[in-house]
């Protein structure tokens, strides 16, 4: 399950991706439009900036903007920046590995084997899905809704 921090980070990157190439966006606008608590968003944007995904400008007309094109920012980066593990079990995690207490032998554990496949599939999808892809999917879903 994604943490709120990760979900909010993705939402903020998506709205900034839609605004890419324009003036920086103020935190208050992002927080209002995406229904994110402003104080929490400030910390998230600071983490994203410190990780090299965002640029910040102080003063009048200031705010945050993407440093990279939304096509170059992948969901796997966002998960890793916000501290979210990709694996559903700690014993298959690449970055947050922990041995399961109840497991007698990792090498013959069928559960671990299945969830290693799940991790690998998730990693592949997240590594290939950019913020631009999320924006495209959102636009496609909005366009496919029929008005009654």
Image (cartoon, rainbow, N blue to C red):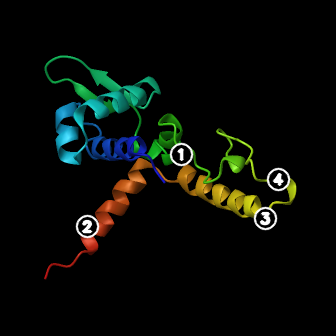
The residue that disc 4 covers is 106
Number of numbered tags placed on the structure image: 4
The residue that disc 1 covers is 76
Please tell me how crowded label 1 is: few (under 14), some (14-19), or many (20+) other residues with Cα within 10 Å: many
Q: Give me the C-alpha separation between circle 4 and circle 2.
A: 45 Å
- 104 in relation to 74, above or below: below
Q: Residue shown at 30%/23% (left/top)?
A: 56
**Quick one: label 1 or label 3, which is nearer the N terminus?**
1
Q: From the top left corner, tell me how far across and down residue 76 is, in percent.
A: 53, 45
Q: Give me the C-alpha separation between circle 1 and circle 3.
A: 26 Å
Q: Give me the C-alpha separation between circle 1 and circle 2.
A: 25 Å
Quick check: 129 left or right of 41?
A: right
Question: In the rendered image, which quarter contains the C terminus?
Answer: bottom left
Could you tell me if residue 6 is visible in this image? yes
**Quick one: label 4 or label 1, which is nearer the N terminus?**
1
The residue that disc 3 covers is 110
Q: Secondary structure at mark 1?
A: helix
Could you tell me if residue 25 is visible in this image? no
Q: From the top left corner, tell me how far across and down residue 123 is, in percent.
A: 61, 52
Q: Secondary structure at mark 4?
A: helix
């Amino acid at each position: 399950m994604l943490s709120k921090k990760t979900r909010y980070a993705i939402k903020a990157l998506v709205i900034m991706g839609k605004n890419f190439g324009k003036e920086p966006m103020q935190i208050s606008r992002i927080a209002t439009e995406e229904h994110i608590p402003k104080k929490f968003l400030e910390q998230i944007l600071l983490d994203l900036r410190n990780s090299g995904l965002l640029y910040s400008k102080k003063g009048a007309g200031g705010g945050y903007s993407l440093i990279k094109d939304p096509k170059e920012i992948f969901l796997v980066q966002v998960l890793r920046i916000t501290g979210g593990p990709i694996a559903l079990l700690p014993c298959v995690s690449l970055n947050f590995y922990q041995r399961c207490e109840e497991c007698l032998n990792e090498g013959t554990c069928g559960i671990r084997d299945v969830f290693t496949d799940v991790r690998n599939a998730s990693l592949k999808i997240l590594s290939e899905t950019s913020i631009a892809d999320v924006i495209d999917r959102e636009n496609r879903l909005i366009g496919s809704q029929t008005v009654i």
